[in-house]
Amino acid sequence: MASSVSHNSFSTIPLFVGFLVVASSLAHVLSSPLMSDSGNRQMKNHTFKPAKDIQKLRRINAYLKKINKPAVKTIQSPDGDIIDCVLSHLQPAFDHPELRGQKPSDPPARPKRHNSTDANPENLQLWTGLCESCPEGTVPIRRTTEKDVLRASSVRRYGRTRRRHVRRDSTGSGHEHAVVFVNGDQYYGAKASLNVWAPHVTNEYEFSLSQIWIISGSFGNDLNTIEAGWQVSPELYGDNYPRFFTYWTTDAYRATGCYNLLCSGFVQTTNKIAVGAAISPISYYNGRQFDIDIMVWKDPKHGHWWLEFGSGLLVGYWPAFLFSHLRSHANMIQFGGEIVNTRSSGFHTSTQMGSGHFAEEGFGKAAYFRNLQTVDWDNNLLPLTNLHLLADHSDCYDIRQGRNNVWGNYFYYGGPGRNVRCP
């Protein structure tokens, strides 16, 4: 659930950050736009090519017609988003041949030892703060605009990542992490409370995110991941709001998968949350702290991977048929932050991770994850054991782990990026 968190007394957490070689480069590469951000039909090299531009705009309009479904109601969000209330069976997922003509799956059995309610959810997103809602039988979908697509490298790659090799050691890939992970077992889900901030992102080619990764595969081209959390991504959304997001891939980000509902895959079942919409409220330095609960787990009956957000609100699911390795189970769970460092000015980026402050500053200043848990084969939520920590560049972004009776397993993480120790 989204909660206002007060500080319990914590003892000083000893610094425990190391560079661990781990299969963790699970990032989304942003690529340069072909056109200017204003959406003008003039290329960035100022060479005017009307025929080529018109062809591109035609492809964009065709894509928008396909991805933006007819709405029974439209809501204007204060942040500029347009939220369309789309009949559930018309959402993009049901364009998939395996789902066409079907109905959403029945709700799954929640993991044991999980406390949740199906009561009315808190207002966790800006668009719901106006006492607006989508009718029953519909799902709220953030409308994709021409400007959104023009920021991407191409229509085909919008909402997806550029092909790249995923290495076990992420150092040098341009993506930097501060994470906790567990591996060496079979995992059927994970849960945590994520502290929400609005980190500064230096340019539109970079992002900052905090998320849970559900991972399986050999870390070659067969890598399967399910990812959920919050992110600031100027390229994807055109602003610097922290947004609730999802991602999935079955081939190491090569051709399958996408963010949110930008392709046929994730099936949304709720009419109360828009995937890709801005989260509200957020945390402030030396001020009130807010976090959100996120849980992903495998339905023991049908094998789908379900997503829960806030106080027991079922958002939807990734159908089992989308995956190869994750059709069975995960072999790694990861929690934490990630940024992209393009070194666009010739030195390390100033894009922030988490709150933009190092882990040692603690509550109210550094970002945190708390109550880290995994789901076992018998659908039980269990505390993590045998945790590993990874900070790719601890002088830029670091991490500190702890445990107590209130927060269970937790960690502080993040940093400012470029500083005297991170040139």
Image (cartoon, rainbow, N blue to C red):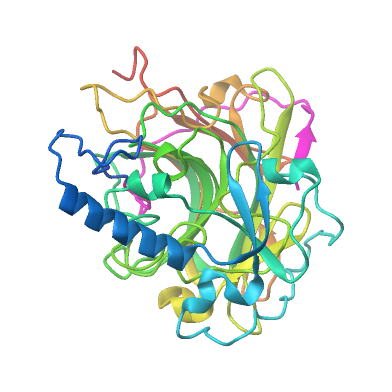
Q: Position of residue 213 (x, y in %)?
A: 49, 55
Image quadrant in which the C terminus is located: top left
Q: x, y (%) of residue 179?
A: 47, 43
State the residue in front, 14 or 273: 273
Q: Quadrant of residue 79?
A: top right
Q: Nearer the viewer, residue 130 or 22?
A: 130
Which residue does the image show at 85% across and 55% down from the upper left? Answer: 120
Q: Is residue 254 above or below residue 368?
A: below
Count the marks: how many? 0
In this view, the residue farthest toward the top is 420
Residue 234 visible (yes or no): yes
Left/right placement of residue 241 relative to residue 393 reads right
Q: Name the residue at the right extreme.
A: 119
Q: Nearer the viewer, residue 111 or 315?
A: 315
- Point out residue 247 in the picture as x, y percentages from the top left corner: 47, 58
In this view, 94 is above or below 233: below
* Magenta stretch contains residue 7: yes
Q: Main secondary structure of the magenta part?
A: loop
Quadrant hosting residue 238: top left
- In the image, residue 144 sits, relative to residue 66, either above or below, namely above
Q: Position of residue 9 (x, y in %)?
A: 77, 25
Q: Residue at x 64, y 83 (%)?
A: 103
Q: Is residue 2 visible?
A: no
Query: On the picture, is 398 further left or further right than 228?
Result: left
Q: Residue at x 51, y 29 (%)?
A: 199
Extent of the magenta region? 1-29
Does the magenta segment cover residue 102? no
Seen at 20% across and 39% down, the residue is 43
